[in-house]
Image: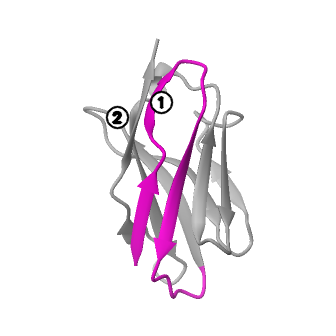
Amino acid sequence: VQLQASGGGLVQAGGSLRLSCAASGVVFVGYIMGWFRQAPGKEREFVAQIMWYGGETVYADSVKGRFTISRDNAKNTMYLQMNGLKLEDTAVYYCGIKPVSTGRYDYWGQGTLVTVSS
């Protein structure tokens, strides 16, 4: 399994970015894909996740109403549309896969840096 995250960059507070996570080699019957982030000096935290085949989504309270997670089954790609970005959203964003069979995030992409400036 390989995950390739992209789309990070520098944006002003209040702006928008869209992250992408392209997956390859995924052979699981059921799985969840998610976004996590890690700010400098902090632990990695959950941002959002989506059930690949059903489309059910879950968001962290800190991003509800501002971020939208989605996926394109044909392209095996997951997205995170981030609107209304705040300074505290600055972090390296990672995408991961959680097979239903294991119930944990076993596979991770390399991360993409999002920097929100004032």
On the image, the x and y values in percent for residue 38 come to: 36, 41
Work out how far the residue at label 1 is from the one at label 2, CA to CA, in angstroms: 8 Å
Residue at position x 25%, y 32% in the image: 41
Q: Residue at x 38, y 72 (%)?
A: 106
Could you tell me the amino acid type at mark 1?
Asp
- The answer to whether 1 is drawn above or below residue 42 in the figure is below
- Horizontal side of 91 relative to 79 (left or right) equals left
Q: Name the residue under label 1.
A: 89
Q: Is 19 a magenta residue?
A: yes
Residue 73 on the magenta span? no
Vertical relation: 36 (above or below) 42: below
The number of numbered badges drawn on the structure is 2
Q: Residue furthest left?
A: 41
Q: In which quarter of the image is the N terminus?
A: bottom left
* Residue 18, quarter of the rendered image: top right
- Left or right of residue 91, residue 20 in this image: right
Which residue lies at the image location 47% right of the left edge and 77% below the top edge?
A: 24
In the image, what residue type sits under mark 2?
Ala
Q: Which colour scheme is used?
A: one colour
In the displayed structure image, the side of residue 3 where residue 70 appears, left or right: right
Q: Residue 63: x, y in percent?
A: 61, 36
Q: x and y percent of residue 26 in the render?
A: 49, 82
Can you tell which mark lies on residue 115? none
Q: Name the residue under label 2.
A: 39
Magenta region: which residues?
1-30
Sequence-first tag of 1 and 2: 2
Q: How crowded is mark 1: few (under 14 residues within 10 Å), some or many (20 or more)?
A: many
